[in-house]
Image: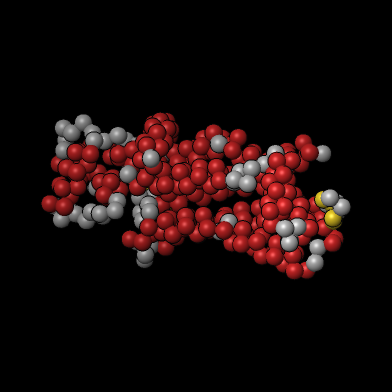
Amino acid sequence: MFQFFANIFGYLLEFIYGFINNYGLAIICFTIFIKILFIPFSVKQQKTMKKTAKIQEKMKIIQFKYKNNPEKMNQEVMELYKTEKMSPFSGCLTAIIQIILLFSIFYLVRSPLTFMQKIPTENINNYVSQLQENGKSVSSAYPEIDIIREYQFLKEKNPDDEYIDRANLQMNFLGLDLSKVPQQNLTDYTVYIIPVLYIISSFVSIKLSTAMQQKDKKKDQKQDITIDGTTGKELVPKEENEMDAIMQTNKMMSWFMPLMSLSVAIIAPLGLALYWLTNNLLMIIERLILNKVIKLKEE
């Protein structure tokens, strides 16, 4: 499945690269296009986040009111979701899309000659064999990246090959070689620049998301939500602590994707980290704009 989407994304990235002729700029433009394409999902996610913050306060009251009647509690919780026109699994679609994008883009950046340049597998295997026969180092994980790096050598060996010129990708971006893999170049400080910027942008994105959720929570607490005669003020510390623990668990889970992405970025070519960095920066801008638009619409 991931290879299917990587192949589709490859057509788009190759089209953009044809105009720009720089791999790094092509990835940035590609990321912007994908972000625009998924704006409807982003809007839905932003609305879901706001509704979730509101529902959590109401769920506290329901859990307190029916703590001795689990069956009634479940009925009231489902009724709450129905009233708010929200599904308990509303966040699953966004998570699935993120996972598909994560691995599809990984496949694309890992094998740009296959998915982007559409060079037949037979030719790629032939290039790898030629490099190995001539004592050139070829990574088992990223052989196509090594082919791109050794383009001049392979061009001399295969002057009549109709596909070899497709391996001539411009991988230099602002002085950074996007074909490098941090794990394979530990002594080169430049390979850490993009991953570090990615981590910083992840911190900012998560902090921003947390701040927005807390702001919505305080707003709902000020409204003193009431359900069937029971208000939030009637909650005892034990119930509040239990809900806070649930929120802390959700907060910890929000770190899962960035940490998993970082672990992959260390063992993948820098082009992948550039995609995630650009995506994070766009996400921050998008979140600020959508939050303002949704807020104005609510008012």
**Position above or below: 236 against 286:** below
Query: Which image quadrant: the N terminus?
Result: top left
Q: Is residue 69 left or right of residue 134?
A: right
What residue do we see at 44% from left, 59% from top? 263
What residue do we see at 59% from left, 45% from top? 89
User: Going by the picture, which residue comes out furthest to the left?
Assistant: 133
In this view, the residue in front, 132 or 165, is 132
Q: Is residue 219 left or right of residue 125?
A: right
Residue 153 in the image: state x and y as whole percent. Answer: 20, 45
In this view, the residue in front, 40 or 83, is 83
Residue 61 lies in what quarter of the image? bottom right
Q: Is residue 19 left or right of residue 283?
A: left
User: Going by the picture, which residue comes out furthest to the bottom?
Assistant: 238
In this view, the residue in front, 286 or 63, is 63
Residue 125 in the image: state x and y as whole percent. Answer: 19, 43
Query: Which image quadrant: the C terminus?
Result: top right
What residue do we see at 45% from left, 43% from top? 100
Residue 60 lies in what quarter of the image? bottom right
